[in-house]
Image: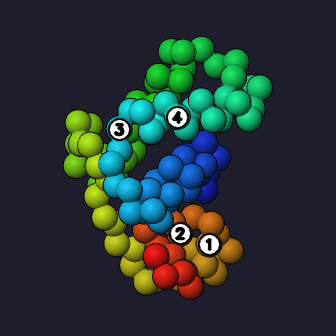
Amino acid sequence: MRRYRLIWDFMVSVIGEKYRTKQYSFGKMDINVFFMQLQEQDDYVAGWSDSTVKKIGQVLMKIQVENEYLYDLKADHIDPVLLSPILERAIADNHDERALPAFNCFLGEDV
């Protein structure tokens, strides 16, 4: 996430928001909406071909499966994840608290 801004934005704005709102349904539509919003905000992304967007969307789905957010590519909801307290503390110590919702972790919030 820290290495690639696109993944950071997706994990925080899509996955983190789903955990925050307890709306666990998930599918390709979520990825499509993410890209539509991103294309509205960024002219560079707006210039990406449909095949580029599709491929990146496939990569985002695969990342979700590999990291056990999704059971498989056909899953229709994200699974709960548990963040170790050591990793949570390391993220906070690194001043990356904005990333915590992507791990279903909300410091100081009653969610």
Q: Residue 53 placed where, x, y %?
A: 53, 24
18 w.r.t. 52: above or below: below
Q: Secondary structure at mark 3?
A: loop
In the picture shown, does residue 50 fall above or below 45? above
Question: CA gap, disc 2 to disc 4?
Answer: 22 Å
Q: Say what secondary structure mark 1 lies in.
A: helix
Gap between marks 1 and 4, in whole Å?
24 Å
Mark nearer the N terminus (3 vs 1)? 3
Rendered image: mark on residue 100: 2
Disc sitting over residue 97 in the figure: 1
* Amino acid tagged 1: Glu
- Residue pointed to by mark 4: 33
Tell me whether circle 2 and circle 1 mark residues in contact (CB < 8 Å).
yes
User: Can you identify the residue that label 3 sits on?
Assistant: 27
> Which three-letter amino acid code belongs to the residue tagged 4?
Val
| Foreground disc of the pair 2, 3 | 3
Quadrant the N terminus occupies: bottom right
Give amino acid for label 2: Leu
| Residue 31 horizontal/vertical position (percent) | 47, 36
Position of residue 23 measured from the top left corner of the image (x, y, whole percent): 38, 56
For badge 3, the amino acid type reads Gly
Taking the spot 33% from the left edge, 66% from the top edge, the residue there is 81
